[in-house]
Amino acid sequence: MKKLILLIITAICLSNCASFSTKIIKEQITKLDRENIQNIEGSYALSCYDAHYLSTSKKRKVAQYENHIDVATVNSFTNTIIPRRGTDTNYTVDIKLLSDTEIQFTYRSENAIVNQTTLSMKLRKNGMIHLKNRETSTKGVPMIFGNISVERSRIGIRKNRDLILNNVEFIAGGFLILFGDGRRSNTTFYFKRIITPS
């Protein structure tokens, strides 16, 4: 019971630590609201073509990855397995709003649907759609002898109408709290829009 209570308290604390930063995207996004939220709908390339992150320097500058990190894909943030078809890498993802609280990701290879995921969501005042895909994992006894990881994602539209996916992950651990360690990553990925809905 004590371990469960400790885990809940730690998770709540780290959820607050795993907060998004607007520094990366503030010059990039077109803010979504209830009037234009449909602009998120469309078809996008599965793999990102560019990525920025907050550097670990004291000034926390926005830095660009030298390589485009082609391994970063939309499905990896929606926990969707995409079965590969031989050497075919021409995968796309269709995004569709089902309601004010649900969003659907449909993954295609050419014209064939290979998988589909529906997530709960919430449109925030910051103009981004926050996905209900938060993952919390633990090893050992968090903050005592082990660590805990919290990961969250949100999506939006770039000024050129491409998809923005902002992901934050916070990992903390320690030995009897005295040697605690916390690491936070805040990365934004960009995905090319292929089809603009009519």
Image: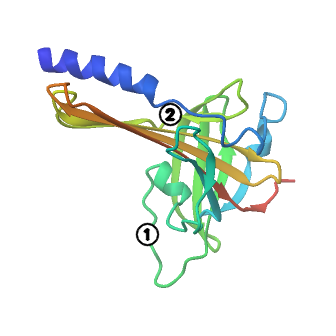
Q: Is residue 1 visible?
A: no
Pointer 2 residue: 132
What residue is at 21 percent from the left and 15 percent from the top?
5
Disc 1 marks which amino acid?
Pro
Question: As displayed, is residue 11 above or below residue 54?
Answer: above
Pointer 1 residue: 83
Whether residues under marks 2 and 1 lie with C-beta atoms below 8 angstroms apart, the answer is no
Query: Distance between the Cα atoms at labels 2 and 1?
Result: 24 Å
Q: Residue 30 falls in which quadrant of the image?
A: top right
Residue 122, image x, y percentages: 61, 28
Q: Residue 162 falls in which quadrant of the image?
A: bottom right
Residue 196, image x, y percentages: 82, 57
Question: As displayed, is residue 48 above or below residue 56?
Answer: below
Q: Residues within 10 Å of mark 1 (few under 14, many from 20)?
A: few
Nearest the viewer among 26 and 32 is 26
The numbered disc on residue 119 is none
